[in-house]
Amino acid sequence: MTSTDTWLVWLDDDLRLDDNSLWQAALEEHPAHLLVVYILPETTFQPIGSVSPDAARLQPLSVARQRFLLESLESLQAGLQTLGSDLLILQGDAAHLIPELARQHACRGVIARRATGLVERRQQQAVAASCRLRQVNSGLLLDEDDLPFTLNELPETFSAFRRKLEKAYPDIQAMPAPMEAPCALPSWPAQAPRGMQGSARRLHAARDWQSDPRGEHAFLGGEPAALQRLEHYLSPEHAGQYKTTRNRLSGADFSTRFSAWLALGCLSPRRILDRLHTFQKTLPELCETPQAAFKDSDWIRVELLWREYFHWDTRQLGRQVFLGYRMRLHAGRPE
């Protein structure tokens, strides 16, 4: 390793420090410098509905989602800075920008989460054709090697998937544990820009968007807000009644509200299960009906298994996931 040894970490839906295998993978390479990059898609600021659902392009973001993303990126950048690193945010075609950045800063390679979505997978394939790309699993409960079957043997129904997983992992404690956030990261490359650059700065305009107070819950993007929500919700009054209340339509705490943070990777599903397990162990001390509270709160685990199933189903089927069931049976290999 030389003093100019640099690796690039390409973030997508990985906007957290906690339980993020991208940082572990980066540290394993022993770089002197780390360039951490997030790319806003070209379509981010286009009008809603302007991109055809049939197009192999990512959809535009509403102003509400732009604000949540802005808050999440700013939160992550602040966290990275405390560890001696930083964040570069650009807008454009990641398949072009990532290899160009890797060339400009003489990066030995690029580290990214193995993508699930079709568009993101094509981007990664293009990057891999231009420079060294190390893909790691992140953001799911299980790595592919942890599945009790091969991906080609993925059950066709969630119920069958759940039964196989629960046989292999009979309780939460048996699931893979989350990893802790890094204590420090390699320094920033001396000549690399930081923060939002170019057209990505348009994201700042979303700061003025305000949610309707009738929604009864104000979302704040970023990992600290996600972890705060997790701690708030894991109580007998909330998680202890989750299965009973989760389908209500009003109130701040009838459901977990975790999905917005999970979608951007501000919150790890493994961290949720880890904290859920800790909460469930304390139920006899916290409430008069611990068995009922355990059953209700355990439905959070079941909903995370639903999320897990659809990720693996999408990864296996590629574009076929958008076809009807009968059409899938006769389709060719997924892209």
Image: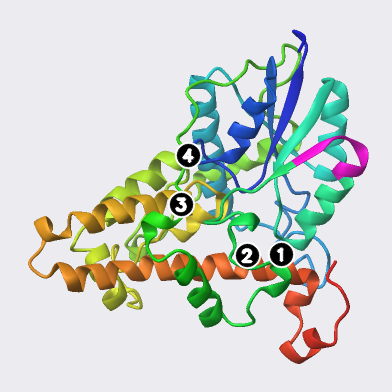
Badge 4 or badge 2: first in the primary sequence: 4
Label 2 element class: helix
Q: Crowdedness of circle 4 by 10 Å Cα count: few (<14), some, many (20+)? A: some
Q: How far apart are marks 4 and 2 (CA)?
A: 21 Å
Mark linked to residue 315: 1
Who's the residue at 10% across and 63% down the image?
Answer: 287
Label 3 element class: helix
Badge 1 or badge 4: first in the primary sequence: 4
Residue 34, above or below 115: above
Which residue is nearer to you in this view: 198 or 119? 119
In the current view of this chain or complex, which residue is farthest to the right?
Answer: 129
Q: Amino acid type of disc 3?
A: Arg
Q: Which of marks 4 and 2 is in front?
A: 4
Disc 4 target residue: 179
Q: Position of residue 24 (x, y in %)?
A: 59, 33
Disc 2 target residue: 311
Q: Amino acid type of disc 2?
A: His
Q: Is residue 291 left or right of residue 202?
A: left
Q: Amino acid type of disc 1?
A: Arg
For the C terminus, which image quadrant? Answer: bottom right
Q: Amino acid type of disc 4?
A: Met
Q: Is residue 116 left or right of residue 54?
A: left
Query: Dots 1 and 4: beta carbons under 8 Å?
Result: no
Q: Crowdedness of circle 1 by 10 Å Cα count: few (<14), some, many (20+)? A: many
Which residue is nearer to you in this view: 72 or 46? 72
Q: How far apart are marks 1 and 4 (CA)?
A: 24 Å
Label 4 element class: loop
Who's the residue at 62% across and 18% down the image?
Answer: 186
Q: Distance between the residues labelled 1 and 2?
A: 6 Å
Q: What stretch is highlighted in magenta?
A: 127-134
Mark linked to residue 270: 3
Q: Where is residue 64 in the image (x, y as percent from the top left)?
A: 53, 55
